Amino acid sequence: MGGITTRLHWTDEPYKWHVNDGEEVFAVLNGRVEMRYRLSGVEHSTILETGDVFYASIGTEHVAHPVGEARVLVIEREGSV
């Protein structure tokens, strides 16, 4: 898909805080994930269950923390973190 990467992650390790240079879609295929994100410098958190999707717009600082083992599908601009 022109300029888009799609990756499947199976992990129980947290990701690192990052900001993508494009949009990102993060879909939980199995398990639970705590998604933390910052808006105007204020940290927020939401729990994603199996079937939930998190959309990070350009410039949204965020990090995913699996709660136990989780399988996630990440769709983002090619070359993003």
Image: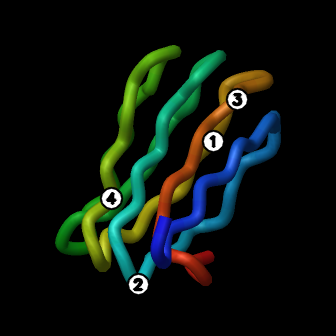
Q: Amino acid at mark 1?
A: His
Mark 4: amino acid: Ala
Q: Is residue 77 left or right of residue 15?
A: left
Which quadrant is home to the C terminus?
bottom right
First-in-chain label (3 vs 1): 1
**Which is nearer the N-term, disc 2 or disc 4?**
2
Secondary-structure class at tag 2: loop
Q: Are marks 1 and 4 in contact (CB under 8 Å)?
A: no
Residue ID for mark 3: 71
Look at 64% across and 17% down and name the residue there: 30
Secondary structure under badge 1? strand
Mark 1 Cα-neighbour bin, 10 Å: few <14, some 14–19, many ≥20: some
The image shows residue 9 at horizontal and vertical percentages of 75, 43
Q: Disc 2 and disc 3: Cα gap in Å? A: 24 Å
**Which circle's residue, 1 or 4, is located before the other in the chain?**
4
Please give the residue where the numbered disc 2 appears in the rendered image: 21
Whichever of labels 2 and 1 marks the residue nearer the N terminus, that label is 2
Return the residue at label 4: 56
Residue 48: image quadrant is: top left
